[in-house]
Amino acid sequence: MAESDTEVEFKKETVSKVLSSFFREDKTKLSGDATLLMAEMLKVFVQEAAVRSLKQAESEDCDQVDIEHFEKILPQLLLDF
């Protein structure tokens, strides 16, 4: 498995649009701080999912992480968040 030092971040505009799509009223606003916090939460969630999927693949003696590994860790990951 190749290690990468690249930091992945979600665009503030994308996070804002995704969150705003769930608002029921047009008057609802989203602050910049809330958007940044949600972007950080998404980053942590994705990193944790990747690490857990990797550990699952390693426990099954696989050289590559497949969607099946992610599907196996997903229920517990959702409960943890």
Image (cartoon, rainbow, N blue to C red):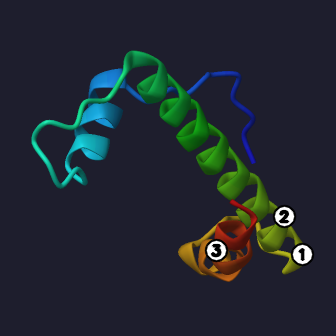
Q: On the image, numbered disc 2 is attached to which residue?
A: 55
First of labels 1, 3 by sequence position: 1
For the point 69% across and 29% down, the residue is 4
Viewer-closest of 3 and 38: 38
For the point 64% across and 74% down, the residue is 74
Total count of labels: 3
Q: Is there a contact, CB below 8 Å, between mark 2 and mark 1?
A: yes
Q: On the image, numbered disc 1 is attached to which residue?
A: 59
Query: Which x, y percent locates residue 7?
Result: 61, 22
Location of the C terminus by quadrant is: bottom right
Q: Residues within 10 Å of mark 1 (few under 14, many from 20)?
A: few
Q: Residue 2 bears which disc, if any?
A: none
- Whole-Å distance between the Cαs marked 2 and 1? 6 Å
Amino acid under label 1?
Ser
Q: On the image, numbered disc 3 is attached to which residue?
A: 74
Q: Nearer the viewer, mark 2 or mark 3?
A: 3
Q: Secondary structure at mark 3?
A: helix
Does residue 18 appear left or right of residue 36 in this picture?
A: left
Amino acid under label 2?
Lys
Q: Which of the 4 quarters of the picture holds residue 52?
A: bottom right
Q: Residues within 10 Å of mark 3 (few under 14, many from 20)?
A: some
Q: Is there a contact, CB below 8 Å, between mark 1 and mark 3?
A: no
Query: Which x, y percent locates residue 9?
Result: 50, 26
Does residue 21 appear left or right of residue 72 in this picture?
A: left
Amino acid under label 3?
Leu
For the point 49% across and 32% down, the residue is 39
Up-down: is 74 above or below 44? below
Q: Residues within 10 Å of mark 2 (few under 14, many from 20)?
A: some
- Whole-Å distance between the Cαs marked 2 and 3? 13 Å
- Whole-Å distance between the Cαs marked 1 and 3? 16 Å
Residue furthest out toward the left: 26
Viewer-closest of 30 and 43: 30
